[in-house]
Amino acid sequence: MRLTLGLVFAGFLSGSLQAQDLKLWYNQPAEQWTDALPLGNGRIGAMVFGGVNREHIQFNEETLWTDSPRDYNMPDGAKYLNDIRQLLFAGKQKEAEALAAKHFMGLKSKEEERAPWVEKVRDLASLKSNPSAAKYNDSKWKTIQLPAINGWETVGLEGLDGAVWLRNSFVLPDDWAGKDLVFDLGKIRDHDFTYVNGHLAGTTANASDGRMYVVSADKLKKGVNHISIQVLNYFDKGGLVGYKDTSRPMRVYPKGASEQQAVILSRSWKYMIQDDDPPLVGTYQASYQPFGDLLLTFPDASKGVSDYKRELDLTTAISKTTYVSKGVRYTREYFVSQPDQCLVVRITSDKKQSINFQAGLRSSHKQSAVRVIDPTTLGLSLQVKDGALKGESILKVNAIGGKTRVKNGQIHVSGANEVVLYLTAATNYKNFKDVSGDAAALAKADMEKLAQQSYGSLLNKHLNEYQQYFNRLSLSFGSSSESTLPTDQRIEQFAKNNDPAFAALYLQYGRYLLISSSRPGTRPANLQGIWNDLLTPSWGSKYTTNINLEMNYWPAESLNLSEMHEPLFDMIEELSQTGAETARKYYNAPGFVVHHNTDIWRGTAPINNSNHGIWVSGGAWLSTHLWERYNYTQDKEFLRNRAYPLMRKVALFFNSYLVKDPATGLLVSGPTNSPEQGGLVMGAAMDHQIIRDLYSACIKASEILNTDGELRKIMKSNRDRLTPNKIGRFGQLQEWTVDIDDTTNKHRHVSHLWGVHPGADITWDKDPEMMKAARQSLIYRGDEGTGWSLAWKINFWSRFKDGDHAWKMVHMLISPAAKGGGSYVNLFDAHPPFQIDGNFGGAAGIAEMLLQSHSGYLDILPSLPSALKDGEIKGLCARGGFELEMKWKDGKLSDLSVLSKAGNTCTVKYAGKELKFATERGKRYPIDSALQLIK
């Protein structure tokens, strides 16, 4: 019944959707990856650059990761649990962290000894000639631009780890003669041996240390001086990465002199790869991987190009590039089909026999190869380094007219009228325990299904499948003159001008990204959705469960995309299996636990460092999403068969895990942390808020299902004895059980406000004083933050019912990424670097301004900014099983309509008025601006 209602409503909305400003567009091709436009079907992701003479489409397949199924758990962690707790209760945090670091962290993947390899590459005598020597001949070396803040992988050396020599030179100014020089090189990943004129200037093994070496005057010479650096990079970003403050260059200057007199070394450097097979570096969890690149070269389009435009239409999930070259208009259309599991590219022109190009495949994986299958088909095979996963991709070129042939591993098309390219991709991943799939057979089967279908048929199926989701919600904040600007310029102008329509576009873009990265039957959206171009992406592009993964799904229910939640629920079921083993081995507890990260293999053990990696509430937070699904849909079968059994398991874990605080006699969580700051503790407000909400949800669910009466009593008792929220000496909501908050702390995490949002532990209705304390905490923490942090603050200020402050945060979120946390050219959220959670959190936050339902009633326009004085939304969902249409004018509600999907009693509040009425399932209830039912 729910789907039927959704489809009927989607048809009703289609007219209003046409009037919305729902395109991202640009008048130049993408230069950076974060300029490119994203496409996806939940499994296959693509980034379209829209180049004229060289089109680059980077693609991913969601199950291509490093590592393999393995045990992540320390076998005897539980032996040390009580000792760690006692140290923490005694105030010995450092000792507790040291003990936990040794015995309580998870197991890494395979690691190899470094010393033999280092000895080999440092044996310079074994080389034909010494690259550190001043007179070394480097004329045949290639060049690279340095520093590269995100590693040499981003400037042409993707996939490279190992020993690399870098060389440069500078002319010694006459007035520097006889002076010692400072070589300020910034950070170098990982270990460097830096020489000047053949003399060792310094060596540092710590990748996080800035390099600042002093070279004495007697090692320098008049004229040209040579710098040689041997870089040993074991894993992740490599080379000269400089400083986080990119305005600070690499440089050399006289000791004691002003840095303004420096010779700048941020420039082109020569490089030579000495050895690209370093020893394996163990990792706690796996990293999401890029798959490959589809490259199209158009030799006729290099000159005389005009009328260029590239765009992404959110209403169709189709990207398009158009331009005129030599009087011919060319059009490329791109989409990723969910029904047919393929990337489709169609190339047309307004003149027959004018399409000429070459198509090729490549991959950044070291173990990869392209093969010719037939004159119109290429194959790409790859193996993830030191991992269990293999990938296969097939490219098919179907040209109408002209000639098609294979040359040098590429497909050459000449004189065609129209060309359609199809790309499929698959891996051998079956599930988190099984990698026995046949990637080649899967990619081939998907391609064979396309053989008898026309482009029109593929397009129609794609549109029908995608639009059944996207068309459920329409939104307008009015029009603006800025809508005529390209998206990159609109981002630049957003904070300066009043462009509310851009915020509406941003919300719909969040919905588009969720549909594109998280379809039913796929894995959930990771830290970058399904889009990643690096072999060593930031934070592994995995799943961070102390905020980021959950934030990805904040819009799922409220923005009418409930089905997109399914992959997360599938993951929770898998985590309940691996997390049960972690609960047993670390805590001797039943149920299951998830610490602050997981990956494709569903690792649940603590990772990284004991001062932030031991956080136990990941499973509890995730389980609240199951309860939210029930709250929005009122689906009792889902609650009975899927949600409550998983929620119950997490509750069982906490029944065993919680301990009495000897100082207060109340229950506390620990060992734990308040995410990513403050170190290992006993008792953090965030934990207690999540656990309290979990217990409340389980109690209510057990009552609805009429089950677990005895367990319900235990949960009620534990909830009542759990350490409550506290107001500290600065009028703030305490982040920890003890009052140690620092009002100057501007940390990106604001974890102790979880009870304000996304939880409902702290509300204006329950406890206004605690709400004020939470608001004071946010004031102390400040507005600045990373992209996802800004998005969370939109939601906080919306819950505080300060719409103008929330709108200020929207302005900060939709601002150029070059200024810090904000948005890239393609509107991807910038931590920086790219993290998709801010897109989803921002979309959800804008919706929170318009409707809130976490307190048991529909709160209409609770946090409407003055900038959004006029607007309309259709298809916005609320807890209790309701879907709303509403309009407002001059900041005041003008029309409201409530669709009841479950037949529950509905309570509506607006502007001090309240309306409560019984409903029938499937019936719509119009309400006037005075909050009276319209008969």
Image (tube, grey):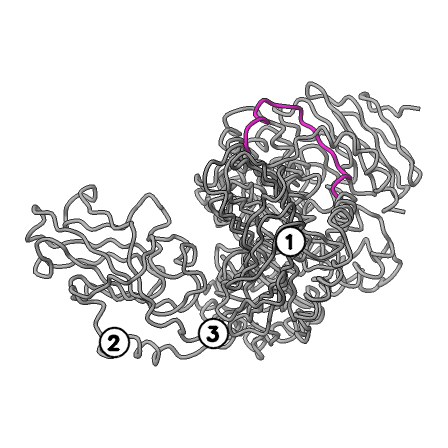
Q: Which residue is mark 2?
A: 127
- Which amino acid type corresponds to the residue marked 2 in the rendered image? Leu
Residue at 28%, 66% in the rendered image: 230
Q: Position of residue 767 (x, y in %)?
A: 68, 39
3 or 2: tag closer to the N-terminus: 3
Q: CA distance from mark 2 to mark 1?
A: 48 Å
Name the residue nearer the viewer: 517 or 735.
517
**Residue 429 visible in image:** yes
Q: Is residue 701 above or below residue 67?
A: above
Q: With 557 as the anchor, is 552 left or right in this view?
A: left
- The quarter of the image holding the C terminus is top right
Q: Which residues are magenta?
A: 469-486
Q: Position of residue 734 (x, y in %)?
A: 55, 47
Position in image of residue 435 (x %, y %): 66, 74
The percent coordinates of residue 419 (x first, y second) are 64, 49
Quickly name the residue at label 3: 102
